[in-house]
Amino acid sequence: MDWAKDLPFEVKQVGIDIDSLDEVEWLFWVGCAGAYEDRAKKTTRAVAELLHAAGVTFAVLGDGETCTGDPARRAGNEFVFQQLGMQNAEVLKETSAKKVVSTCAHCFNTLKHEYQQFGVELEVVHHTQLLNRLVREGRLTPVAPVESSVAGNGASPTRTITYHDPCFMGRHNQIYEPPRELLSVIPGAELKEMARTGERSFCCGAGGARMWMEEKIGERINLNRTSEAVATGADQIAVACPFCRVMLSDGLTALQADGSAREEVEVLDVAQLLLASVRRTPAAPGDPAAVEAESAETEAETDPLDAVTPPDADLHDPGDADTAARLSGPTPSPDEIAFPDKL
Amino acid sequence: MFAIIVSIAVTLIAVALFARTAAHIVSVVGTGQPAPGRTNQPATRWVTMLRETLGHTRMLQWSLVGALHWFVFVGFGFLFFTLLTAYGQLFDASFALPVIGHWVAYEWVTEAIAWLMLASIAGLIAIRLTSSPARSAGRYSRFFGSRMWQGYFVEAVIATIGLCIIVLRGAEYALLGAEASRLHFPLTFFVGDALGGMSQPALENLIHLVAALKILVSSAWLIVLGLNATMGVAWHRFTAWPNIWFKRHADGTPTLGGLQPMMAGGVPIDFENLEELDEDTAFGVGKIEDFSWKGLLDFTTCTECGRCQSQCPAWNTEKPLSPKLFVMDLREHAYAKATSLLTDGNSRDDPPHGDVAEADRPLIGDADAYGVIDPAVLWSCTSCGACVQQCPVDIEHIDHIMDMRRYQVLVESNFPPSSLHFSKDWKAGGIRGTCRLRPEWTGRRICRSK
């Protein structure tokens, strides 16, 4: 598991480190983006670190996980979706998964609503919901600003954050408040909403398998949305879905390239923003002494925003954020899916 | 006397036309496929329907328009009593409904609602005028592509009826002369005072005439509905109720979240029953009759209000997809095709689409193929759910788009027109092949082919 390589603790994998998910509280469903896409991997790591810091036990499926099938289904390929769904369902049953946390709004939605069809009933939460619960329970405590890659002004509480609602969390699942509550408890940061927000939020352009399609007609949806986010004057654009993250990061890169966005602005997942402000300690939560002793150095070592992996600036393809850039694929792998005869 | 004959005759014609078209709508909707699960939890469904209609919960997402529409909605329903009164007034100018007609509470409510309805419809007309595509933002008007005459017609009918009620009440007050009490005419006595100079026979004639006008305008509304089965802005008065009652989630949650399984004859298709399926079973929706009856009811119900269009990320970035226009096109096709099929094949001597009869138009095809829905429309959807979230009458746009995509991909092997690698990746199981390679993965982009 590439994403977990440099974490200062071990991430348990079902089938290798543990036999069954009964031994932990949560299955952490990492998702394709969370496992392979450099920007999303930072979210994955941040969530793993936060769960670890809060003393929450979890495990991942590693190779046992495959795409949930959301893009396949929404591109009309119901049989690929069913194939993927059955495969995942088998693993979820074998490992007796019951409670799942996901960082991807699409995985979250599909696992939550579409897997009953395969005989899997799960309690599925989005990472912002779980993290919000942990903050409320006092198991994670955001503290005054620390050095982050943008607002490294020490005590100056001038950083503004805007939040982009992922469609599959907001409208599709009515989750609007947990990410906002998380952002509001981060000290030294002010939440500034875009005009189109909540139920009337504007899509990033990646849903419905549009992530994998070219966008040749009209204005790019991601540029439209990113411009709106930038216009709030926010220093950080908070997202809660890897699809949104790709679209808005690409949009931001394009806007920065043509000078219409400040260079300092960045797109980050809510979990990364939280992690940057949480004192982390491997000790039991609620132990003030341990917290005091550990926090300073831990933060310095494992700052999620710039440690662990090199910057991924080369990922951005300014002005060309379409399929060609997102999805350059050489020859596809051999046909692995058994298509029905009719096809 | 003349007014009596004309009013009654027109009423009879109007009711007959209306009933015939209502039956036609039921038969067209009935041509759809089964839609299982739409009648579960009936008690919850009744509560949901009453909450969404009487409470205008979806409408009030736009507070001003929602509030104005609520008064019109209430007025249009409650003031039916005044229509009954008008029939009596054709015969006897001082007619009032038995029992409730002179009840103070009824009179107060009637007058209050009439004024509020008048004020509200004036507001709605003003909104429609100022935000019409011709006057304001063109494509960015939510009414772009809506049939404006239909909206104005409905609004004019309501305004005229509201005015008739006020004038009738005023004339009734004046007719009572010295017996008149402001207690019984709290909001119209001044109209009566203004008419005070008229003689009693003149007042009686005025009442007969205005009552006849009210009946004729109401009948005209029914006649126009009877002649336009696809006039959702008027028909939603009747179709919105069942459309909300039959929405996917009985508890009123918008039809978002998970997609519905692909159905054949109301049964979900999976790998287990795939072999047993009929040779010509459609995967998804390839022609209008493949939609479920709920889909056809959705199309019938669209009021063309354009809230969906105003929020759609595709439409707002100059793409050809507007959820409203998508639904309107499907509705026109459904009714045109049903008519030509019900009248024994191609009765149209002069097909409107080149040489292609309505029944022969492909459901999905570009302009050259006379397709009903252009592939560029179909593939522009991001499934973001804004349209479904907005729709005041609970149309389930995304389900319809996805069903049409299913047919395109699984039966026609027509993939999105502008995708790199899309078709070959997917036919080759690209999603699975690319996304499951965990440790070896070194690519930088989501699901890149390895």
Image: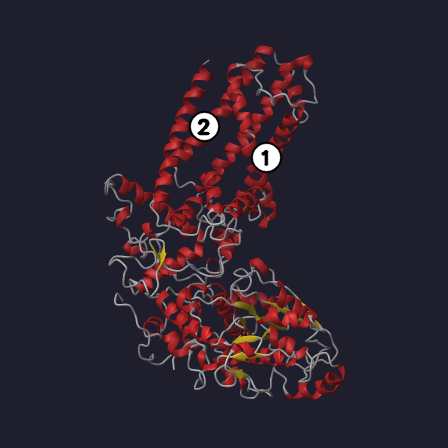
Element class at badge 1: helix
Residue B391 versus residue B5 in the image, above or below: below
**Residue carrying label 1:** B117
* Residue at point 58%, 66% (across, down): A164
Pointer 2 or 1: first along the chain: 1
Q: Is residue A163 left or right of residue B217?
A: right
Report the residue that reaches farthest toward the right.
A289
Q: In the figure, residue B117 lies in which quadrant? A: top right
Colour setting: secondary structure
The answer to whether any part of residue A342 appears in the image is yes
Q: Amino acid at mark 1?
A: Met
Residue A240 versus residue B183 in the image, above or below: below
Q: Nearer the viewer, residue B271 or B29?
A: B271
Q: How many C-alpha atoms fall within 10 Å of the one at disc 1: few (<14), some, or many (≥20)?
A: many
**Residue carrying label 2:** B219
Q: Are marks 2 and 1 on the same chain?
A: yes
Q: How many C-alpha atoms fall within 10 Å of the one at disc 2: few (<14), some, or many (≥20)?
A: many
The spot of residue B59 in percent (x, y) is 56, 47
* Residue at point 75%, 81% (across, down): A288
Q: Is residue A274 left or right of residue B396?
A: right
The spot of residue B186 in percent (x, y) is 68, 25
Q: Nearer the viewer, residue A318 or B41?
A: B41
Residue B344 versus residue A155 in the image, above or below: above
